[in-house]
Image (cartoon, grey):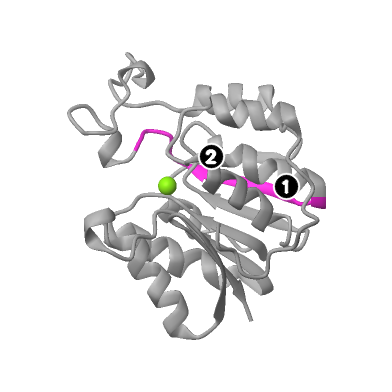
Amino acid sequence: MARRGDTPSMPPMNPVRAAVADATKGFLPAGEGAALHDAALSAPAGTWLEVGTYCGKSTVHLGAAAATVGAQVVTLDHHRGSEENQPGWEWHDPSLVDPHTGRLETLPSLRRTLWDAQLDDVVSVVVGSTQQVARWWTTPLTLLFLDGNHTEEVAQHDFAAFAGHLVPGGLLLIHDVFEHPEDGGRPPWNVFRRALYVGDYDEVGVTGSLRVLRRR
Ligand code: MG
C-alpha cells in the first residue's frame, strides 16, 4: 500500500467489528476497507458523512474509526440499490429483493450489520436520495466519504452538494476512482480530478481505488 502521510501507530480495528465488516456484503476489498479505517482515524472528531451505504460494509470501517476518535457517522442511502444492483445487471443480488416492492432493499441488512458491530450509538442512518437530503443538510463535516450512485450526474451532484460542508482539515474520501477507463467507470475519477482542480484539497493517500484528500 502506498499511503503518503501514514503513521506506524494506527490502532488496529476492533476484532469483532473487523469480522462483521468481512462478513458484510459489499464492494470494498479488504485492503481498501483497512485503508478507509486508518485514514478516518486521522480525521477530526465531529460529524462524518458516508454517501452510499448498501449493506454497511464500509460503514463498519468508518464507524469503528469514529468510535475511536469520538466522531459520529451519518450514512446516507435510499437503500433501493444503484442501477448496477437492479435485476438483470452484473451486481444484482436476488436475496436482497423486497417482494413487496420488487426492488432491492438493503436497509434491513444494514440494521443487522450495525447491531452486530455494536455501532448503533455511533452511526445514524438517513434513508433518502442525496438530492433530497442535500436540500436541508447544513451540518459542517469533518469527513466525507463519497461512494454513492456512480452516474456522472449524481456523482458530481454529491460532490457539489456535500464537499462544501467540509471544514478545513477535513478528509474527503472517494471510492472507485480508476485512472484508466479499462479498470472502471469515469465519474468517480472525474470527481477526484475536479476536487484537485478546484484547489481546495491535497491528496494524502491512495489504496486501490480509494483516494484520500484533505481540505486545506
Ligand atoms: Mg464503491
In the image, the segment drawn in magenta is: 69-81
- Mark carried by residue 30: 2
For the point 63% across and 42% down, the residue is 61
Rendered view: 35 above or below 108: below
Query: Can the viewer see residue 84 in this picture?
Result: yes
Front-lying residue, 91 or 115: 91
Residue where numbered disc 1 is placed: 65
Q: Residue furthest left?
A: 88
Q: In x, y percent, where is residue 33?
A: 56, 44
In terms of sequence position, does the residue under pointer 1 or pointer 2 come before the other? 2
Report the side of 29 relative to 84 (left or right): right
Q: In x, y percent, where is residue 203?
A: 54, 74
Which secondary structure, mark 1? helix
Quarter of the N terminus within the rendering: bottom right
Q: In x, y percent, where is residue 173?
A: 54, 60
Report the side of 152 relative to 14 (left or right): left
Front-lying residue, 6 or 170: 6
